[in-house]
Image: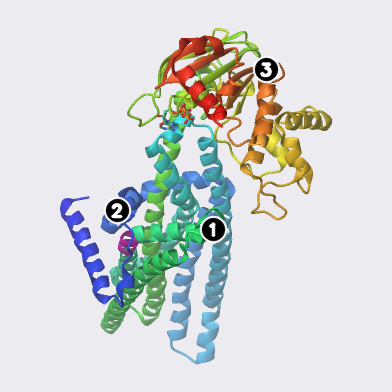
Amino acid sequence: MADWRRFFLRVVLLRKESDHRDAAEDDRSQPVLPELTEHRWTRHTEKLVETSMRTMARRLPSVIAQSARLAWRASRVDTSVAIGLNLLAGVFTAFGLLATTGVLTALFSAGPTPDRVRAALPSLALVAIAAALRAGLQAAAGWAQSRLEPQVERLVELRLYELTTAVELAALDDSEFLDDLQRARSRGMMSAPRVVTTAVDVLTGAVGVVAAAGTLGVLHPLLLPLLLLTALPEGWASIRAARMRYVTELALVGVARRKWILSDLMADRRHAAEIRSFTMRGFLLDEYDRVAAYQRGVELDLARRQTIARVYGDMMQGVATAGVYVALGLMLWDGAVPLAIAGTAVLAIRTGQTSLANLVFAVNRCYEEGLYFGDYLSFATQAEERVAARALPSQKAGTETAGTEAPAAALPDDFGKIVVEDVTFTYPGADSPSLRGISLELHRGEVIALVGENGSGKTTLAKIMAGLYDPDGGDVRWDGVSLREVDPRTLWERIAVIAQEYTHWPMTARQNITMGRVGADGASTETAVLAAARASGADEVVDGLAHGYDTLLDRRFQDGAELSGGQWQRLAVARGFYRDAPLLICDEPTAALDARAEHHLFERIRTHADGRTVLLITHRLASVRHADRIFVLDQGKVTEEGDHEHLMALGGLYAELYSLQARAYHAA
Ligand SMILES: Nc1ncnc2c1ncn2[C@@H]1O[C@H](COP(=O)(O)OP(=O)(O)OP(=O)(O)O)[C@@H](O)[C@H]1O
């Protein structure tokens, strides 16, 4: 944005704010919480405020081309019908106007009235046929246009979610990427059908203008500029009203965000208990009222100024129309145009006026939606690039996203040894590495424990071993096969992860265990579900549910059940056991479990969880003393390694932490 424009915009906004402060009825017009405006969320509004009609006209073709491509992909038939019928309707508009000349010529000719009317009938029939055909074509084109909307919507939504579920996990730790995703998901995705609709509106308006202008050109070349003269004031008024809306939106961005946050706090079930116990109701309602009062003031002012702009527009249009009629009168007087042509010209000018005003409005909307749709497109391109960068060579050939071809290297179904070699990793945007050269080995059938203080890197290492992040340096190999060389999905087929932060899936208890993976037949799936539930203690939870395994676990739905934190964790553990995977990664699997359930689970893990290899992360050190080997992590490095006895004899961090916990139990 040019500096002077930035300055001007700021002055406009500051002036508006001070106006509102002056006009405030009481001190409730200003919110008391801090400002929530963020530039990156307002960039398009700023752009719209400063965009001139010329810039819009210059950039519009590329927006229209984008929307045409999108519409074409969504439905070739509906796109062709919407465009083709609109063009045809334009032909009939022009045809109907020209036929009107015939009607008027007959009516204005000399002779008795019945004869004149009879003479006008053939042209009148043509006018009626043209009008009926035009209306029919426009209705059919409108139908195709509205059919396009849901198809475009489906296309862009599916594409977005294909990408969000395919990008590597690290992308979702990148705040820039997350911001772009938010923009694409909220306004960008919504704009896709709108950009297509408004592009068709631009076409409809343009066809109407061309039809009217063409007719006027045929009637008399001087009539053409008259059309522009009368239509411009209304176009000016509608653009000006839209600009005012953008400026107001810009000024209210912070206010609107605060309103959403407050309404979410007051209406969401998660906050309900705290609002009551901390007696926050009055404070929140008061703040909401202040924000709403401020917003109302600004919006009422907008309505007033928009009305004034429209009244000016209407007045100017009235003057221009009067001027046109005077000019037409003079042309008639002068004999430059016959009366019938002048009559048709009046009709053509009215048709052209409406179409031109619609066109200007549609151009403005199409450009606006195009800017937001641009967010969607740039996010999709960015995400596609990320997916392609992660894809293996064989996956890249001929595929847009990862996931349709065979992996470059085959991962063994089971393994003899997993080697982690000198792994380093820094989260996107983080200042320091979370892992600094970690090396360890896991042998088939072992129980390996990772221990260490908060933030030492245990979960990060587990995620790298689970193929959720690629290490920056070093490697993880399954019997010599590097995880970098395999399709991560083949790895995910061979591991089960009981994560530290797991999802409370709003599905049935059974689906929470199977997670879409069902066995060869219903009976074997049921047996596996029951075994996994027994192993984790989830069977006791399910026994207490109204519909057993078919109970929906979400209170937002009818008959949905609410589970406690520990009950959810039992289900998460059952999910891990249900996946019959050779490697089981358990990250704090007992944090919410009661003592009995915890003991039961660790017993199973100690006995190798039915033959699996287990990577266990826990702070309950009493539970790791039976692990085959224990790795102690400190600030992203392995500082101690060995079995319990060895580490206790070493007298290092493990011994210190273990003794601390042991003392706490014996203190009483
Ligand atoms: N998504 C993330 N983005 C940036 N930094 C992260 C992210 N997740 C973890 N970290 C950082 O990486 C370091 C290691 O975190 P990690 O979760 O691996 O520790 P941990 O040993 O599992 O801790 P805890 O015992 O508390 O679960 C920490 O300093 C943490 O702040």
Residue 326: where, in percent of width, then height? 27, 82
Say which label, 1 or 3, has the lower sequence index.
Answer: 1
- For residue 40, side relative to residue 444 (left or right): left
The overriding secondary structure of the stretch rendered in magenta is helix
Return the x and y of residue 320 as percentages of the image width and height. Answer: 28, 77
| Mark identifier at residue 272 | 1
Q: Quadrant of ligand 1?
A: top left
For disc 2, the marked residue is 47
Q: In which quarter of the image is the C terminus?
A: top right
Which is nearer the N-term, disc 2 or disc 3? Answer: 2
Which amino acid does the dot numbered 2 rest on?
Lys
Helix, strand or loop under label 2: helix
First to last magenta residue range: 246-252
* Left or right: 257 in relation to 72: left
Kindly identify the residue that appears in the image at 29 percent across and 82 percent down: 322
Write down the residue under mark 3.
608
What residue appears at the point 71 percent right and 43 percent down from the top-left corner?
508
**Eyeballing the image, is 475 above or below 300?**
above
Mark 1 vs mark 2: give the one in front.
Answer: 1
Find residue 643 and report its image quarter: top right
With 491 as the anchor, is 453 left or right in this view?
Answer: left
Quadrant of the rendered image containing residue 332: bottom left
- The mark lying in front, picked from 2 and 3, is 3
The image shows residue 233 at horizontal and vertical percentages of 30, 72
